[in-house]
Image (spheres, helix red, strand yellow):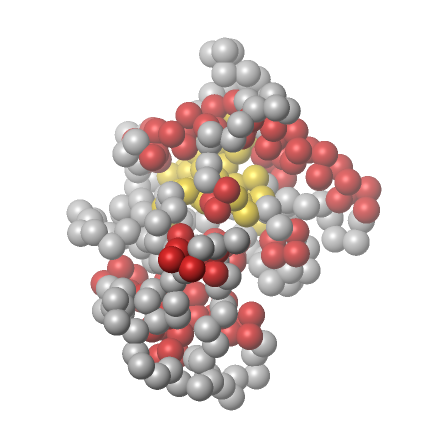
Amino acid sequence: MLDEADMIPFGLLPFDYHVMAKWDPNSPLSKKQQHRVLIESWLRLGKHGRNEYPAGEDPPDEFPPHVPHDLMAEEERAVDGQISRVFWIRTWYGQKDNKASHDAANAAYSRLRLIVMQDGDPNGINSCLEEECIFENKEEFGPGSITTLEEDTNPDFEEGIACGTPGSIPSYLITALMHYPDTFEDEPLPDLEKWQDLMIVVADRKACEEGWVLFLAVNHHGKILPFRARERASWTEQIIANYLDGQKLDENTVDPDKDMEVYLHGGSGWDPDSVP
């Protein structure tokens, strides 16, 4: 439970002002759907547009009565804009309405998660990612969720495998940002459209079943940059650590503008990091 001193009241985060400006009390959308639409418009603003909204030290004395204050949990508000810019997102939960497929997906994911976050040790400590950066809720990211309402027509996936289409804003990133919309950098950047502002580590079907974890770099609009990488489960922590130390994903290629998905190692996705 949060200490009162750690709570961030509504009106102190930049996204709060976007909500106040754009919330439509007459919208036919549900509260969650309208929240998602606001995240999409928040991304479209880009860095310069978002910077027009204040990070308020003095919130307004009064708020429009129709504006919701609870789109984010208190725990999320307390760390929004302060967590690492790395999101681990599980997107594979098995085929819709197929219990056997769901069970197999859960078993495969458990194996992947154990290797990535605990180095294969059930008693190991997760030193790879902050808990706030881990998204693995089936109700939010699984079949029939707000992320994949139309699973068969979702352009982000082909049979459960993430496409990572350059220039697209993946549906699962939008869902994750509903929790932490102020994650993006607010410092001056050299080339906004090509600069990696966030890393998404995707546990899709290929990652869960074959051990090949997908790494996506996204810019200030949330758009996927051209270079994508697959890496063994055992190397995932190292790739994340490299990024947090300042190494962008496209430093693994001599042609960052080329549309390509590269396997950074050979062999099996389940090979230990001791195997070259």
- Is residue 135 or residue 254 the one in the foreground? 135
Which residue is drawn at the image coordinates 24% and 54% (left, top)?
186
Residue 155 position (above or below residue 35) = above
Using the image, determine if residue 5 lies above or below residue 104.
below
Residue 63, how many percent across, how many down? 37, 82
- Give left or right: position of 106 versus 126: right
Would residue 112 be visible to someone looking at this image? yes
Q: How many marks?
A: 0
Q: Is residue 230 left or right of residue 210?
A: left
Kindly tell me whether residue 77 is visible in this rendering: no
Residue 215, image x, y percentages: 45, 37
Q: Residue furthest bottom?
A: 26
Does residue 44 sit above or below 242 in this rendering? below
The residue that appears at 44% across and 86% down in the rendered structure is 65
Residue, far front = 4
Query: Looking at the picture, how far across and down is residue 175, in whole percent?
Result: 52, 58
Q: Is residue 158 above or below residue 64?
A: above
- Residue depicted at 68% across the width and 46% down the height: 93
Q: What residue is at 71 percent from the left and 39 percent from the top?
A: 105
Q: Position of residue 135 (x, y in %)?
A: 55, 47
Residue 43, quarter of the rendered image: bottom left
